[in-house]
Amino acid sequence: SLKAGEALTTASGEQRRVRLPDRSLVFVRQGTTLNVTRAGALAVESGEVFVEASSDRMTPPLKVKTPGREMQTRGGRFG
């Protein structure tokens, strides 16, 4: 799992599945760079991810920022 302040970069041909501090699950494709900016926030700098956001009502919605868009969800799935 990744903690707030940690980053992840996947190499060519590498795919990863990581858990975020809020219990959301992120599938990370090859050639992706991302940062967990805080417990419920993810910044995708490059590459591709698929997110299954936690549906726990006790945690704030997950915020995902990419170079071209910013999304927020609780219990949603998107890529």
Image (cartoon, rainbow, N blue to C red):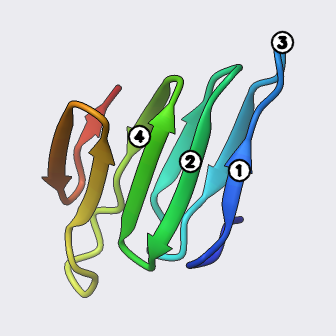
Marked residue nearer the N-terminal end (4 or 3)? 3
Q: Judging from the image, what secondary structure is the residue with disc 3 in?
A: loop
Query: Residue shown at 20%/60% (left/top)?
Result: 74
Vertical order, 3 against 29 (above or below): below
Mark closer to the chain start, 4 or 1: 1
Q: Are marks 1 and 2 in contact (CB under 8 Å)?
A: yes
Which residue in the rendered view is the most extreme toward the top?
13
CB within 8 Å, label 2 to label 3: no
What residue did someone put label 4 on? 51
Q: CA distance from mark 4 to mark 3?
A: 19 Å
The amino acid at mark 4 is Val
Residues packed near mark 2 inside 10 Å, few (<14), some (14 to 19) or many (20 plus): many
Q: What separation in Å lies between label 1 and label 3 (alpha carbons)?
A: 15 Å
In this figure, what is the number of numbered marks?
4
Furthest-bottom residue in view?
58
| Residue neighbourhood size for the residue with mark 3, other residues' Cα within 10 Å, grouped as few (<14), some (14–19), many (≥20) | few
Please report whichever mark, 2 or 3, sits nearer to the chain's N-terminal start: 3
Indicate the secondary structure of the residue bearing disc 2: strand
Would you name the residue on which mark 3 appears? Answer: 13
- Left or right: where 11 falls relative to 45: right
Residue type, mark 2 in image: Leu
Assign a secondary structure to mark 4.
strand
Name the residue at 29% across, 36% down: 77
Residue linked to disc 2: 34
Q: Amino acid at mark 3?
A: Gly
**What residue is shown with label 1?**
8
Please indicate whether residue 26 sits to the left or right of residue 13 in the image: left
Q: CA distance from mark 2 to mark 3?
A: 17 Å
Badge 1 amino acid: Leu
